[in-house]
Amino acid sequence: MQLPLSFNIIRMSLHKTKHLFFILCISLIPFPLLLHSQPLQLKIAGDTISGFHVDVFDNNQLLVTNSEEFSIDLFNTDYSTMAHLDWKGESWSGHEHQIILQRNSYIKAFDANLTVTITYEVINENLVRKTVDLFQPSMPGLLYTLKETCRPAKIPERYVTFENDSFPGGLVHEMYPSAGFITSDKKVIGFLTDAGYKNHYTRNTRRRFSGEGGGFVGMRKLPDPELFSVADSTDRAAKNDYIRYTFGEMYDLDAGTQTILKLPDQFQTEGHVDIKSLNTNFSITGTAAQRAAVDLIAPFRDQQVYTISFLCKGNVPVTLKLFRIKNGHKTIELEDGVKYIDHFPPGSAEWKLFKGSVLVPYINHDSVSMLIGTESGKAGQLQIKDLKIIEHKPHHVAYHILPIGEKSTKTTYMFVEPWTSHQQFMIDAQSRLAEGKGFQGSLIEKMLYANFNMLTWITDINDFTPFNVPNMNYAPDMYNRDCFFAGVSTYNKDLNLSLWSQWGKTQNAKGAIGTIITPRMGSVEVKDNEATIEWLIWAMLNKRRFGITLPQDKIEKAVAFVMNEFDEDRDGICLSHFPLNQLDVIDFYPKTDRLCVNQGMLAIALRTIKELGFDIEESYVAKAENGYRNFYDEQRKHLIFDRNYPDVIALTDLEPEFFSLWLFNKPILTDEMVLNHLDQIPIFNKVPGSPNPDYGTTAPICINLTHDAIGYAYFDGPDQPFGKFGEENYSNGKNEGYYYNGGSWFRAEYCAYVVGLKHGWTKARDMMDNRVWAEIYLNPEWPFSKEFIPTQWTTTDSWWVSTKGLCWNVFMLMANEVAGLRTPEMDPDYRKE
């Protein structure tokens, strides 16, 4: 039976909708009509003898010039022969809004021809795109490193990067790749790169240490550490100002030179530690009551690469931690290399080697504290000897390949804005990249789309297939469920099929799809979470969007797994060991049928399987859908998150309803169910400057409803739905408002509001607007996508740095399609078949 579905909210917000569609219509006006007022101009420089290059002007003011368009080092595949070119055009064509440079070169060292075409295009009044096309028909493979050096026409006031308002120079390795310079008349000229899978780079700096107790260690062959670099103080003293892209260069830490550094004489101990000097064998006695460790200031400098090594023996695991020290206080862990090493297993009888590298990017000249010892909470002995820290000057190796007869393209962007603030520079670095790629949408949509592109790079130095990570904190891992929500948000056929196919390769004998793919290390995590269901949904979307023929053997195996794992007796009731959504910090043995979202996801899975051509009776789907509706409690007026915890309410319980509206254009829940559920979600963080200051800007993903005047309570102690994880992390008032103890997750929250919009919830558009505002502006220093926003905090200094830049929030694009706020045609890769 078709259930009631109201669209009253659309009528109530007609004035907003008309205004929005006016903006959208304006954005669809063809580009050439805007050029009459275009201040950015391209001008050719040089001559037929010295070669041609392009200068960029703003209202006849020269902004950027180059001594060459790029330099390139070319190698054959055994590196026995090398050639270097500083490239300028031999011929050119075009006008002030588009210039094309060309040259055919004969490379004598290889007896090979190289054809290069460079195209500059003024995209809009703020943005220029540059593409470099390389082609060689002569050799099976030609390795290369390509550098584009962009030189300010006048000495800049200072340089900026995405994370630093004043950058001193050197390599730039931050959460989002961009850099710029500020002119004396307060303009900022920013530089951006296309996605890594397009320009063939990776921003990964580490690999899992899975077989050795978990955690990460830095890679011995480190690709693209200088993807962006800026003139340092030595360069500037020599009047050599620049911002440089370097594509296809790898550090080889096992080549080059190495310097063993002197360890400090001063150190601190905690717990039972017997030590005379860091250079000697020292012993550590672990107890159940306290940590036992040595803490020292490591001899690290910004923008260098190091290796930490030691031998260990004992019966308690080793902890190795690196923390930044600012003004004498420990702050955050270093990201790029040794991290999360908590349980490295030492040798029990023989000495065992630990060896891990770490890239220290620019960290504002903070000191680095190194802790080594044990914090296992177990009694035991540990011995450490031969502790060494090595500083590398690594060998630089070319790894990009130009295959015979295939074009290779590098795309970069330059934008020009009035300098107002570093916050605005971060916003512009995201929005201008999206515009450069032809993307249309609101500011937040552009920012999320750009973030998605910057977190999609190549898999490894010998594998240029696309690889998508949630954010820099989760790298190097590609997580199935994060990748699904990010990938399906674009209509890029090649990218969707590549990512989806990679996940298909992880399928096990039972038909389940893997959870994690991680470069340079394996993963055997394949379990009965929602990953396989989402892979089937992705298959259905790929078939709808691109008309592809699906690999039927893999589809049949995945369908069999879903059916047998979640509803073996075919009664329409879902049983699972895990929550079938992101709240995955608990598991159930034996399987449970207590969870609302699981029942809803079974209904979505059955309808997906039916569309994929399998014999699924409508009455069977109806049983599953009715089971989802049965989680609504008439007395409490909300969906029951977990039948054992009937007063817990979660926004994620509306996720199956969103899937049904998005995928099948039909509701499962009634208006009453949805509206009552949303009305009971508490809203936090009221801000006067938000679009709707009478409402809060963030809502908890999951929280207790109470029967007192406050009406809600964060989780605490053993009586909460997340089992041991919750008891350890949420007891005694710990982490209230953080992570799954009431944190606000943009994707889940925004999609829930869209469900409300479709069911006539009058607050929907206001709450959507407020939550968008919070994502950009609630923390003024973090104007970008986040894993979650705390719903209770004193200062933004307490926000978790690890949450910065979560990729799956780009799923907002699909939510806005459901809401009627955008169309597929606004995606530059959308193609009507």
Image (spheres, rainbow, N blue to C red):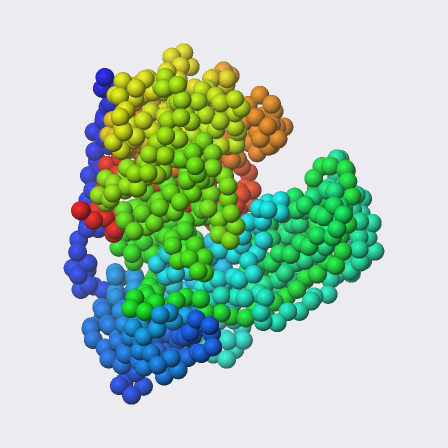
Q: Is residue 672 above or below residue 401?
A: above
Residue at image location 51% in from the left, 70% down from the top = 396
Q: Residue furthest top?
A: 635
Residue at image location 24% in from the left, 72% down from the top = 100
> Position of 38 compared to 768: left or right?
left
Write down the quadrant of residue 608 in the picture.
Answer: top left
Residue at image location 50% in from the left, 37% down from the top = 790
Give the image location of residue 166, x and y in percent: 50, 62
Write down the quadrant of residue 596 in the picture.
Answer: top left
Query: In terms of depth relative to the viewer, which is nearer, 708 or 600?
Result: 600
Give the image location of residue 761, x and y in percent: 30, 25
Query: In terms of depth relative to the viewer, which is nearer, 128 or 542?
Result: 542
Give the image location of residue 617, x and y in percent: 26, 21
Query: In terms of depth relative to the viewer, which is nearer, 56 or 303?
Result: 303
Query: In terms of depth relative to the viewer, which is nearer, 212 or 579?
Result: 212
Residue 671 visible in the shown view: no
The count of marks equals: 0
> Position of 257 compared to 162: left or right?
right
Q: Quadrant of the N terminus?
A: top left
Q: Is residue 614 above or below residue 294?
A: above
Residue 488 visible in the shown view: yes
Residue at image location 73% in from the left, 58% down from the top = 387
Give the image location of residue 406, x and y in percent: 30, 66
